[in-house]
Amino acid sequence: MIYSLTDKLNFKDDPQIEIKGKIITVKSDAETVLKLLDIVQTESQYKGAISAIDLLLSEKDKKTLKSLDLKIDDYMKLTETIVDLALGNDPDEDKHREQ
C-alpha cells in the first residue's frame, strides 16, 4: 500500500516583504523555522533579532536590508514581521481583530 501525502502538504513559495520598492524574501522551510523557534525561546530580544535576520534572509537580502539604514524601532518592527511571516502568521492579525 502506498499512502500519498502530497495532496495534504503545502508547497507555497516563501513569503516576501516589499520595502521602499525592494523585495525581501523570508525563508520559511521547516528546518529554518525550527531553528528560529529555538532562537526566539533562548536569546534576548536584540541578539535574537540579529540571529533571526541572519537565519531567515539570504546574503543578498541582508545587504538590501542594510542599505535601508533603518533606525532601531523600524528594524525591530521589520524583524518581528519577518519572524511572523516565517512562522506562517499574519503580521496584521491584530489590525484584523480591531476592525
Image (cartoon, rainbow, N blue to C red):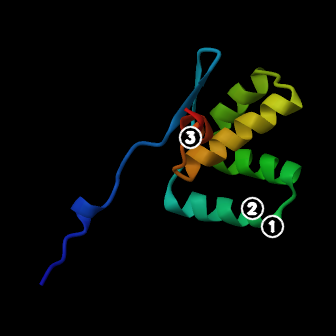
Question: For the point 80% across and 47% down, which residue is it?
Answer: 50
Q: Callout 2 environment at 10 Å: few (<14), some (14 to 19), or many (20+)?
A: some
Q: In which quadrant of the rendered image does the C terminus lie? A: top right
Residue type (three-letter) at the residue carrying disc 3:
Arg
Quarter-of-image position of residue 41: bottom right
Question: For the point 80% across and 54% down, which residue is it?
Answer: 48
Q: Is residue 40 left or right of residue 32?
A: right
Q: Which residue is mark 3?
A: 97
The picture places residue 17, in percent across and down from the top left corner, at 57, 30
Residue 57, can we see it? no
The count of marks equals: 3
Numbered mark located on residue 42 in the image? 1
Q: Callout 3 environment at 10 Å: few (<14), some (14 to 19), or many (20+)?
A: few
Residue type (three-letter) at the residue carrying disc 1:
Thr
Q: Secondary structure at mark 1?
A: helix
Measure how far apart labels 3 and 1 are at the Cα level. 29 Å
Q: Which residue is mark 2?
A: 39
Measure how far apart labels 2 and 1 are at the Cα level. 5 Å
Seen in the picture, residue 37 relative to 92 is either above or below; the reply is: below
